[in-house]
Image: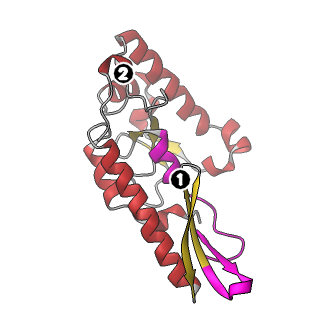
């Protein structure tokens, strides 16, 4: 678990309101036509009726674990709509949104399927006539081994990814909500591939 000097995370009421309104504006923008043109991954993403109200959204933010927190690099936690919703959730709402450090948010972001058709983290090594499993985290690449089938390599990659996600959940426990912690500890890796 990480502990930080609380003084780094203390915001005045005015600063909390300003941050919440800035987040609200960002969410509303991502769900509007502008973002759909420039970031098609947000096409079909909507905001709950409650979250459309700046006043409601601000009060909700201020009451959430992690809202005023910063990571080791001084970055504010991100608001995330995907972790606690079902795999097809496309709604920013009070039921699914949580605040996460960038370190976690980056690890659980979904990716498009591989063009090669191989599972995430798997490559074919022609000279060996084997499949390799490789994982990257925090700028370090770890070779997990060679395997006879892409499925075997994929299983090893998935287990390594699960260990990273659970390690991060434990690292940030107490700074993220219990709901976020539980979702990370039981995270379904199939959610990492966009359809």
Does residue 1 sit above or below 147 in this rendering?
above
Give the residues in magenta.
102-131
Q: Residue 60: percent from the left, percent from the top?
A: 33, 29
Mark 2 residue crowding within 10 angstroms, few (<14) / some (14–19) / many (20+): some
Question: Is 118 included in the stretch rendered in magenta?
Answer: yes
At x 30%, y 49%, the residue is 170
Tell me the mark number nearer the camera, choosing from 2 and 1. 2
At x 42%, y 13%, the residue is 15
At x 44%, y 23%, the residue is 20
Q: What residue does disc 1 label?
A: 109
Judge by depth and name the residue closer to the eye, 142 or 114.
142
Judge by depth and name the residue closer to the eye, 10 or 134.
134
At x 38%, y 50%, the residue is 168
| Sequence-wise first label, 2 or 1 | 2
Quarter assignment of residue 143? bottom right
Does residue 24 sit above or below 36 in this rendering?
above
């Amino acid at each position: 678990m990480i502990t930080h000097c609380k003084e780094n995370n203390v915001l005045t009421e005015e600063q909390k309101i300003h941050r919440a309104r800035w987040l609200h504006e960002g969410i509303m923008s991502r769900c509007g036509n502008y973002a759909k043109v420039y970031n098609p991954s947000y096409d079909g993403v909507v905001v709950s009726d409650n979250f459309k109200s700046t006043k409601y959204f601000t009060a909700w933010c201020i009451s959430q674990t992690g809202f005023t927190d910063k990571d080791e690099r001084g970055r504010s936690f991100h608001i995330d709509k995907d972790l606690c919703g079902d795999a097809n959730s496309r709604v920013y709402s009070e039921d699914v949104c949580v605040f996460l450090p960038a370190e976690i948010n980056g690890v659980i972001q979904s990716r498009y399927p591989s063009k090669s058709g191989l599972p995430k983290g798997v490559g074919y090594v022609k000279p060996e006539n084997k499949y390799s499993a490789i994982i990257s985290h925090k700028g370090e690449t770890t070779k997990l081994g060679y395997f006879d089938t892409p499925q075997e390599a994929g299983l090893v990659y998935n287990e390594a990814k699960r260990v990273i996600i659970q390690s991060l959940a434990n690292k940030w426990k107490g700074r993220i909500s219990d709901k976020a912690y539980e979702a990370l500890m039981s995270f379904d890796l199939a959610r990492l591939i966009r359809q």
